[in-house]
Every structure is written in C-alpha cells, then in structure tokens.
Image (tube, helix red, strand yellow):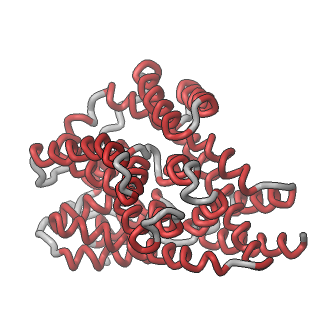
Amino acid sequence: MSRKEALGEVDANVDTKAGTPGEVFRVFLKLGLTSFGGPIAHLGYFRDEVVVRRRWIDDAGYADLVALCQFLPGPASSQVGFALGLMRGGPLGALAAWTAFTLPSALVLLIFAYGASAFAGTLGTGVLHGLKIVAVAVVAQAVWGMARTLAPDRERAAIAVVAVLLMAIAGGALGQIGAIVLGAAAGLWLCRAAPNSAVGHLHVRISRGFGAVCLIAFVVLLAGLPVLAEAGAAGIALFDAFYRSGALVFGGGHVVLPLLQAEVVQPGWVSADAFLAGYGAAQAVPGPLFTFTAYLGAVMRPEPNGIIGAAIALVGVFLPGLLLVVGALPFWDALRTRPLAQAAMRGANAAVVGVLGTALYDPVWTSAVHNPRDFGLALTAFVLLTVWRMPPWIVVALTAAGGVVLALAS
C-alpha cells in the first residue's frame, strides 16, 4: 500500500472495471468475520476495504451512498454493503456481498439458539442474566449516542420527548409508526433551518424503471403480507412480522429492538427473557445486528422455527431495506438536495431517539434490572462501553461472567 493510501487519501483513479461475484464474496466474508462494533464501525471497515485499499469507489461517491442508506429505513451498513456489491458485481455481486457479510453472525446466533436450552442451573442462569443486563448497557449507549447526533437542538429534543409520550399512550407497532410519522411532520415545521447536508455524486447503472419496480414491490409486500397472514399460514405470518419490522427501522440497527419486541414478545412467540438473552448475545458477534432475527426465528414457539424459521426471519427483516436502496439509487441525486426531504428526515430521526428511549425502559430495563446489584453491573457495562470504549464482545463476556458471580452470590 502506498503512503497516500495508508493516510486514507484515495487516488482519483477509481478501479471502474466490473468485478466478479466471487471477488465480492471474498471481500465481504472477511468483513463479516471481523467487523465488530456496530453500524458506524462497519462503515469505517467498508471504507478502508473498498475505498482506500481496492478503490472500487471514490470518497465522494461513498459518502453519497452512506447518506442514502442513512436516509432510508433499514440496516444502513448492510444496505451500503449490498449497494457496493451491486455496483461492483451486478445483482449476483449484491447477493454475494449481503450473504458473506450476514452469514457468519447469523450462524453463530443460530448455534446459540440451539444451545440456549443447555443453560440450566446456577451457572447457565447467571450467564443468561448477564446477557440481559448487557442489553441494558448497549441500548443505553445507543440512546445516548443517537440523542447527541439526531436530537442535538431544542426542536429535535422536543420531538424526541413527544415521541416518548406518544409511546406511553399508544405502545406497540402502531405507536412506533405514529411517533415516526408525526416526527417527520414536525420536522417539516421545526427543522428547516439546518444546513443542507448533501455532498458528492453517486453514479450507478440502475434504470429509474427498475428502481420504481423495487419501490412498488416494497409497498405491495408491506400492504399485502398482513392480508395473506390473516389467511392462517404460519410461515407468511412470521415473514410478515419480520418484514414489517425491517421496513420501519429508521436510525440504526438498535431501533429494531422495540419493533421486534412488539412483533414477537407481545404475541407470546418468544419469551421476554429469551428475547433479551439473544439480544445480549448478538452484541458479541461481528456483522449486522439484524442477524439477531436468526436467533428469534429459531427459538419461536409456533412453527416454523429452527433453521427454517431462522431463514424466514432473516430474509424477512433484510428484504425491505434492500428493496428500498435499489429502488432509491436512481432517484437519490435529485431527492437528497431538497430541503423539505431533509427536514422531514431530521424530524423522523429525532422521533426514533424517543422510540428507542422508551424501549430502554420497557422491555430492556424492566426485564433485566431487579435489584441494586443488577443496576451496578449494568452501569459498569455502560461505562466500559462509553468511557473505556472497550469492544462490545469483551463487555458482553465480562458482563456474562458478572451475571454468574451475582447468581452464585445470591
């Protein structure tokens, strides 16, 4: 690597030749095995690998792609990876990028789902309790970081607080959707003064017609799956629950927590304890947080569950975000410069902070923190994450060990 590349300065000479799906798969498999630290860290790993080292795209184009994926619902890092694979290797390259980046953590969480029943006795109970407690620290860290970024002024802080109040009045998926929609409407009124953040240019070989087909498919599935689920097919109902969760996630992977909780815990498909234990375990693996759904699909009480349930849940939660990014790519350059679109997104993102803050209390806090010792362990994990900046997988391991100590001491 040249000194210029080592310093992160990318040569204007971008490697524009078409790649192969195999090449894309190898690059993203490495990223899927090593990308710890959450969506923001993933974007840094991606830039180092495909912008600095391989020059598949320049910095301006990469920044524009990241802006698009943060504008849309869905898991931003997975959407960026999918789009990079599409630009490098066509549709098969996009599929290769998503599979390679997603599969490692999904397999680990699937194995954990099959082994979770083995966590019996004092030792196993302590480990599972530690995993629930670390979920408190992780979600608190997400709320703190997102509040500083997405609600930094009085107007957006007010939108976040109103979202909390709305969630207190009307919980569940309906309350979450309402809070985000009203947040976007409030953004049109309150958030127009912020400077335009549009930068760079993005060129991708996707026609507007094909993009429109993907956007129509997104809407048809979102509206049609609940109708099909009413017919009584368990597999369709499962796919619908996860598709709806993936379609409504604004603001990062952790925001899927309250949506999934409403879809799988409230109906009794997954117990609250199993839900939080899996969410805690998901912090210890690389790759996208959305692979938590592989665990949920495997431990479901109604069938299909196991490997088939994991596959349905995994595809269901990722599909809407991938349809949206492909559908939006041809229109993005024109849309992103419009002040009203940016103002609406600022309001929606501020409301997301309130939605996630509500989830921090219920179910995360209420299910995990039962006494001062639990609170002390959760606070320790939070400090290790935010002040000491320890890698999440280390904090998960330490908190699980702390859960065992608390179980033995009680």
Looking at the picture, does residue 331 appear above or below residue 232?
Answer: above
Q: How many numbered tags mark residues here?
A: 0
Q: Position of residue 311 (x, y in %)?
A: 38, 68
Determine if residue 253 is in view. yes
User: Could you tell me which residue is drawn at 38 percent across and 74 percent down?
Assistant: 103
Looking at the picture, does residue 314 appear above or below residue 346?
Answer: below
Determine if residue 41 is in view. no
Looking at the picture, does residue 312 appear above or below residue 215?
Answer: below
Locate residue 82 relative to residue 259 in the image: left or right.
left
Locate residue 206 relative to residue 279 in the image: left or right.
left
Q: Position of residue 250 (x, y in %)?
A: 43, 43
Furthest residue in direction top, as rendered: 189
Which residue is at the front of the view, 191 or 278? 278
Q: Position of residue 268 (x, y in %)?
A: 58, 54
User: Could you tell me which residue is drawn at 82 percent across and 58 percent down?
Assistant: 376
Locate residue 208 relative to residue 170 in the image: left or right.
left
